[in-house]
Amino acid sequence: MMGKIIGIILIVVGVALVAWGYNVYDAVEAQLTRSINGETPIEAWIGMVGGAICVAIGVFKLK
């Protein structure tokens, strides 16, 4: 039972992190940085990759 609750929490946190990472990626400042030097902000990568990992672990916990 506790594993399923942790899994649900991880999925919710993971989805929130992915959304935050995408918002950082799509921000005007990030777009300007990408157009000038081609680099994506590390916060965007951390949010999207970390969120995907949290979702994957959460789904694994639910099974």
Image: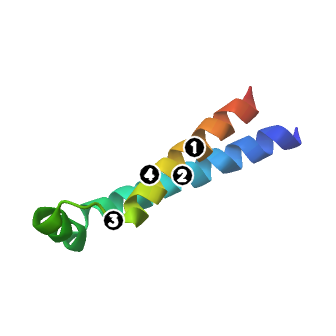
Asked which secondary structure carries label 1, the reply is: helix
Report if the CB atoms under discs 4 and 3 are less than 8 Å apart: no
Residue shown at 42% from the left, 65% from the top: 43
Question: Do the residues bearing badges 2 and 1 touch, measured as CB atoms within 8 Å?
Answer: yes
According to the picture, the residue beneath numbered tag 4 turns out to be 48
Determine which residue is flagged by label 1.
53
Disc 1: CA contacts within 10 A as few (<14), some (14-19) or many (>=20): some
- Give the label, 3 or 1, closer to the camera: 3
> CA–CA distance between discs 3 and 1?
19 Å
- Residue drawn at (69%, 50%), measured in percent from left and top? 9
Mark 4 and mark 3: Cα distance apart in space = 11 Å
Label 2, secondary structure: give it.
Answer: helix
Q: CA distance from mark 2 to mark 3?
A: 14 Å
Q: CA distance from mark 2 to mark 1?
A: 5 Å
Which x, y percent locates residue 2? Answer: 87, 43
Question: In the picture, which quadrant includes the C terminus?
Answer: top right
Residue 38 at x, y percent in the picture: 18, 60
Q: Residues within 10 Å of mark 3 (few under 14, many from 20)?
A: some
Q: Callout 3: helix, strand or loop?
A: loop
Amino acid at dot 2: Gly
Tag 1: residue type?
A: Ile
Q: Which residue is mark 3?
A: 41
Question: From mark 2 to mark 4, how far is it between C-alphas?
Answer: 6 Å
Quick one: 4 or 28, which is closer to the camera? 28
Q: Which mark is residue 38?
A: none
- Left or right, residue 51 beside residue 27: right
Q: Earlier in the sequence, mark 4 or mark 3?
A: 3
Q: Are marks 1 and 4 in contact (CB under 8 Å)?
A: no
User: Sequence-wise, which precedes: disc 1 or disc 4?
Assistant: 4
Secondary structure type for disc 4: helix
Which residue is the site of mark 2?
50
